[in-house]
Amino acid sequence: MRHKEYLAAAARVAAEQLASDPTLYIPLDPDVADYMGAFPEDAIVLADMIEDALLTMNAQGEVQYDE
């Protein structure tokens, strides 16, 4: 079984267990939890980079948005 297939199978089993008993505590492997979306993605996107490039600081130390 390949890694991605393992992650999908483990996530499916965990989801089925939670569907049958929502109060159940299921410890998950961190890779499985990540596959299920438990950890937010903090990557920068192009729109953030463009917006940051338009921010400048004046002589008084105030941040300004220049278009």
Image (tube, helix red, strand yellow):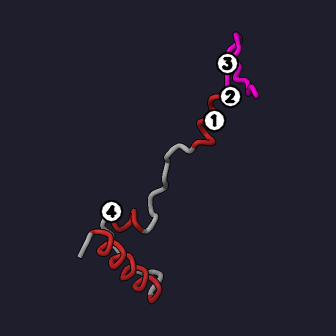
Marking on residue 50: 1
Q: Label 4 to label 3, Cα distance in Å?
A: 41 Å
Give the residues drawn in magenta, as a range. 55-67
Question: Could you say which quadrant of the image residue 26 lies in?
Answer: bottom left
Question: Could you say which quadrant of the image residue 2 lies in?
Answer: bottom left
Nearest to the eye among marks 4 and 3: give it.
3
Judged from the image, the secondary structure of the residue bearing numbered disc 2 is: loop
Question: How many residues crowd around disc 1 within 10 Å: few (fewer than 14), some, or many (20 or more)?
Answer: few
Q: Classify 63 as above or below 51.
A: above
In screen coordinates, is 34 left or right of 3? right
Marking on residue 54: 2
Callout 1 amino acid: Ile
User: Looking at this rendering, what residue extends furthest in the left direction?
Assistant: 1
Q: Residue at x 48, y 53 (%)?
A: 41
Badge 3 is on which residue?
Answer: 57
Q: Residue at x 67, y 27 (%)?
A: 55
The quarter of the picture where the N terminus appears is bottom left
Q: Label 3 to label 1, Cα distance in Å?
A: 16 Å
Callout 3 amino acid: Met
Indicate the position of residue 58 as horizontal and vertical percent values.
71, 14
Instruction: Tell me whether the residue at label 2 lies in contact with that at label 1, contact meaning CB atoms closer than 8 angstroms.
Output: yes
Callout 4 amino acid: Pro
Q: Label 2 to label 1, Cα distance in Å?
A: 7 Å
